[in-house]
Amino acid sequence: MRRIGIALLTVFCLLAGCNQASDVLVSNSTIDESDIGEHRIPYSLSFTEVDLEKPLKKIVETDLTKVILKQEIDNYTTYYYQKNQDDENIFAAIKIGTNIFEIGQVGYSAENTDQYTISRVNALDKNYIKVTGACGANCPISYYIQTDTNSPKVLQIEAHTVEADVDQDGINEIIATVGTAAQTSIYKIKNAHIVATSLNETFDAQEVTYDKESNTFVVGADIWRVKGEELVSPK
């Protein structure tokens, strides 16, 4: 009888021990959903090849009939001028070495010359002379002039533009924004070609803005960052 009692006591203890172990496992597997946090699904960026690069047209100095402004940077001179019998449109030209090349139309006003700027920038893995102006009401325009070639070329983008490495690959992309409800695009180099993507189409959003300080894009109350060819939430 004593042996039977000990055996029963042992079985009871084992059963009690198993129940305690089971309780510990259940406790460890319980997850507080509030600790998971909100992770937004990334958006894939779809880039399309664009044909922006065009050769500059060579002109002569006598074509600069009415120069309203002249700007210099490094060894380059930019002329802003009106053509014969055209008092409404302002054009720009750049002198590279001893040659002068027409850039294109940069504005309509001979008085508001503050909108005409020139700067040296690096974008799309190249050095450019950047010339800005306006092609109409709420229509900014940016020209990127590649001067270090035998045949100078220009990229024309009708938007406010900023050069920044948005995807952190070591190469500055061009971020272009235009419109009262900001329409924002990214231009980059891919397989030696210039490609572009519209962030408004990606998000299906009416307005997308770029914050240069944080290098992020803002859609409503949400903030997004480019990672590779995706837009991800930095949270």
Image (cartoon, helix red, strand yellow):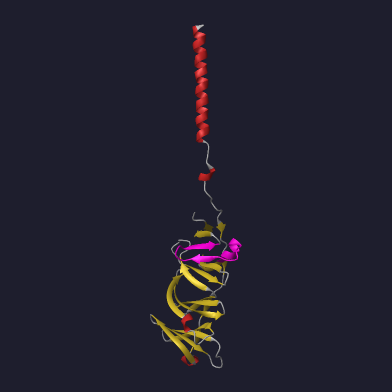
Per the image, is 202 magenta?
A: yes
* Image quadrant in which you'd find residue 49: bottom right
* Image quadrant in which you'd find residue 196: bottom right
Magenta region: 197-219
Q: Residue at x 43, y 73 (%)?
A: 121
Let me know if residue 191 appears in the view.
no
Q: Position of residue 136 (x, y in %)?
A: 57, 80
Per the image, is 203 magenta?
A: yes
Let me know if residue 14 appears in the view.
yes
Outermost top residue: 1
Outermost left residue: 74
Q: Nearer the viewer, residue 27 or 171?
A: 27
In this rendering, the answer to whether 96 lies above or below 203 is below
Q: Residue at x 48, y 70 (%)?
A: 162
Q: Residue at x 49, y 7 (%)?
A: 2
Q: Position of residue 86 (x, y in %)?
A: 56, 91
Q: Position of residue 98 (x, y in %)?
A: 42, 86
Q: Nearer the viewer, residue 8 or 159?
A: 8
In this rendering, the answer to whether 91 lies above or below 50 is below
Q: Position of residue 132 (x, y in %)?
A: 49, 78
